Image: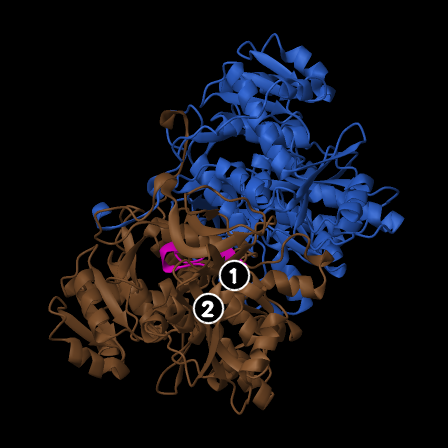
Chain colours: A brown, B blue
Amino acid sequence: MGTLGAMQDFPLRIMRLMDHAEREHGSREIVAARADGTTVRTDWKRLANDARRVARVLERLGVRPGERVATLAVNHDRHLAAWYGVIGMGGVLHTLNFRLFDDQLDYIVNHAEDRVIFYDRVFAPLVERMKPRWKGVREYICFDDEFDDTLDSEDGDYAWHEGDERDPCGLCYTSGTTGHPKGVLYEHRSTMLHTMSIVAPDVFDLSAGSVMLPVVPMFHAGSWCIPYAAALSGMKLVLCADNQPERLCRLFNEEGVTHTAGVPTVWLGMIDHVERTGSPLGKLRMVIIGGSAAPEATIRWFRKRGVRVNHLWGMTEMSPVGTVGAPPSNWDEMSDDEQVHYLTRAGRSMFGVELRTVDESGKVLPRDGVSAGRLQTRGPGVVRRYFKQDQDACGEGQWFDTGDVAVIHPDGSIQITDRAKDVIKSGGEWISSIELENAAVGCPGVAEAAAIGIPHPKWDERPLLLIVRSNGSGVCEIDVRNHLAAQLAKWWLPDAIEFVEELPHTATGKLSKKDLRDQYRDYRFAGAEAVVGRD
Amino acid sequence: MGTLGAMQDFPLRIMRLMDHAEREHGSREIVAARADGTTVRTDWKRLANDARRVARVLERLGVRPGERVATLAVNHDRHLAAWYGVIGMGGVLHTLNFRLFDDQLDYIVNHAEDRVIFYDRVFAPLVERMKPRWKGVREYICFDDEFDDTLDSEDGDYAWHEGDERDPCGLCYTSGTTGHPKGVLYEHRSTMLHTMSIVAPDVFDLSAGSVMLPVVPMFHAGSWCIPYAAALSGMKLVLCADNQPERLCRLFNEEGVTHTAGVPTVWLGMIDHVERTGSPLGKLRMVIIGGSAAPEATIRWFRKRGVRVNHLWGMTEMSPVGTVGAPPSNWDEMSDDEQVHYLTRAGRSMFGVELRTVDESGKVLPRDGVSAGRLQTRGPGVVRRYFKQDQDACGEGQWFDTGDVAVIHPDGSIQITDRAKDVIKSGGEWISSIELENAAVGCPGVAEAAAIGIPHPKWDERPLLLIVRSNGSGVCEIDVRNHLAAQLAKWWLPDAIEFVEELPHTATGKLSKKDLRDQYRDYRFAGAEAVVGRD
């Protein structure tokens, strides 16, 4: 049909976003609250120029299109310039999580074959320690010490590298619970489609008038595509090198922040700070919460202050946004409780993301709000094959198994009930460790809770509940048991409750069930031992 | 790089929108206020089923993928089902403008090689009259008489035709001022990218909670992609067979309409109705105005009632949205007058649309708010080659000449000053016919105005201003002259002002300058004749 007529050829390349921001929103500010305490201001026009100079520097260093360039840095303007500079010269931006262990960083940098690493001075000891192991890295550029001078030697006369829209542009490793981390190689096309999707009113709701402070680190799953969405919408971006509630709140007020985004833990600290100091939230009107489930109390706290909570679910393998926590069409007819209840779920499919649940035999389950099954997904932003793997990560029909267990409600909203590997299998039925934890956290005096399955001779597994008390709280086992009994089925109640000082977390701040399972590998219930003893 | 890793394959096909709406927003209503006065209700799930049955019917009639199927109909649910059904079976939806002249309809249907035509009963006389001339059309299906029965014979068991994302999906002819109408052949990809763009907060701002009543006809430039955007966002769609202000207002209130869209003339009628009857506007919060420039008074009227006016510019060749009239980032710092002044412009580039102005030698002009030049555009939604043409419609770098004359302001906002062919060339300088008309319409007692260039022996061309008085107005030439003199440069003032009963309009409701120029071909200014006489 091509000869009958045609629309223009326009490959979906990331740098069209930068072109747009530079041309249409050139003077819109980018504010960086740096690690040294200073606040610097640049704009899209100057950032584009910096990115062009980064691209020149990389080409001069011999980096070729398709090769990986890593960053080891917190959120700031230079990181953003490097981000777009790497992609602008056709390179693949590999954002490193500085919270990983040395062995993981060793594996990842070598597996990615990173050629150049940009890093913050604060990570210099890590870099020095790792240099002997990172044999393929040709050059290290410290953002604080050499970056500006290096750029000053270039004149910014550069035309972005062009190519196919399926060329890679980003690489992000997920630290799996078993085996080596796996890399998701994002493409220009997948990232562009994802970016176009997330600016929508039902997703991040971003316009030229928005001011976004992403608390989510730039290394975390492509920073949820916020740096791209910022360029598309021409909004003001406020980057903060740390996530101290006091500093964030000051930026909210001083910079007129309207949107923010981050994992639930960040908001717990923020809420605590605001409650203690009475700090206002300025023009904040949306807080995007992802990474793990937001507690109901967090959602209620923001709602009470007129801030819309957009609670969503996704994963690195999904570019990463999968669902949107936006109000459904019958929102206005719902009671306050119904609305909050809806918001505690993981949202519904964003356009371009298909979701389904299947049982252990692979049969597709109904969207009945009851049937729990493995959550699968597919779409243009979903990984087909991990970096350098021989086999596709998805099965027939491109369905990718998320590793989550979920229930889909008739209205399309998703309720993540557990990670498939964390679910507690008791007598052929599944107990959701997450629901158990959420119920426990609702008990006054409980700061954090974790539920894991402990082998049981009769039931296969039974729940052990670990509790961290709030500061100064004297909550005891009876309190927790009474609280749980009021809202859970009897067979869901834990066989034992242990009080601990702290719980292990992963590098991204999630509860590390794997560490807990290791730690409690030899744990036995008092009753179960008796049973074993009796047998 | 393909072997190193990959994201999933997901061609941008229109029917993914329908799949999404059916799956995630299946019970969201589609309301149709039909021509017979009845109001019917369906939803995305039932619409998808109807579309599948339309696809089956078309396949049974021998229509093959890539072939054109036309509709000759106003806005209603059956039209929407046919719309998606045609595209669902791989066909190309050709929406006919029933206001065209017989010769144009003859040319267009034969040039498009339409195989089947769906039509409203009200257009039966037109169809009967044209049948002998439309020799390639195999089948006619009347929406009112045969459509439902035809669908009832199918069971809806159908899987959408799959194919390449660059396959055509829609065809729309533009009635040029010279020569035959030209067809723009939209592709699945270009339409999908356009749809993803227009739901953004700065464009149509559409979410699942939105209720849209598009007054723009479904035949007009793909109905501004609203039927697609509706499916993507899962919003409620309200279709009205006519644009009687009373009926529209009743639907606004009864259906909770939040968004509406149409050409400026529609709103003049609406404003008049509301002023006379005091009818409320219900939950209306955005009126999208395109097709031609909206008068300042219209913008102010809606603003005063808390309705955001999104004034944008585009054309059939652009899919069709080119600019967005959304608030710029410094909106809150602007005065009321400054805001209104901004809104009277044609907005700024939507992401994916590049705009520039060039002078007559092709040199790119600065964005200085002063330099007027031919407006050019490019992007994934812009036509490269008209249907069945041998040559591309765009030049080097894919720049397409819009035929408009514009000034681009430093903030990126566009001011359309004229159509290139309507501009009045006086002594080597350009007089904007549109600015002259806008100034004249601001004079009390003036209902409508048109300015055209009349050949002049000394100045090449000089302006003739044609005025239609408001009902009962006795406005005279001196009034108009005094009004114009207060706001325009002296050399812009018309050499003559004529009062007329009515002005000619095109099929899409725009002033027909071509007809005016024909009508006044032999017109000579009294003074000019004297000059000629003296020579």
The disc, 2 or 1, on the residue closer to the chain's N-terminal end is 1
Mark 2 is on which residue type? Pro
Left or right? Give the position of B150 relative to B19: right
Q: Against B71, is B3 above or below? A: below
What residue lies at 24% left-to-right and 54% top-to-bottom? A387
The residue carrying mark 1 is A204
**Subunit of mark 1?**
A
Asked if marks 2 and 1 fall on the same chain, the answer is: yes
Numbered disc 2: secondary structure: strand
Q: Quarter of the image containing the C terminus of chain B?
A: top right
Numbered disc 1: secondary structure: loop
Q: Position of residue A307 (x, y in %)?
A: 61, 71
Residue B41, numbered label: none
Q: Position of residue B310 (x, y in %)?
A: 63, 53
How far, Cα to Cα, is label 2 from label 1? 37 Å
Asked whether the beta carbons under mark 2 and mark 1 sit within 8 Å of each other, the answer is no
What residue lies at 41% left-to-right and 73% top-to-bottom? A530
* B60 magenta-colored: no
Residue A463, numbered label: 2
Left or right? Give the position of B12 relative to A258: left
**Subunit of mark 2?**
A
* A319 magenta-colored: yes
Q: Which span of residues is magenta-colored?
A: A314-324
Query: Can residue B493 be spotted in the picture?
Result: no
Left or right? Give the position of A294 relative to B270: left
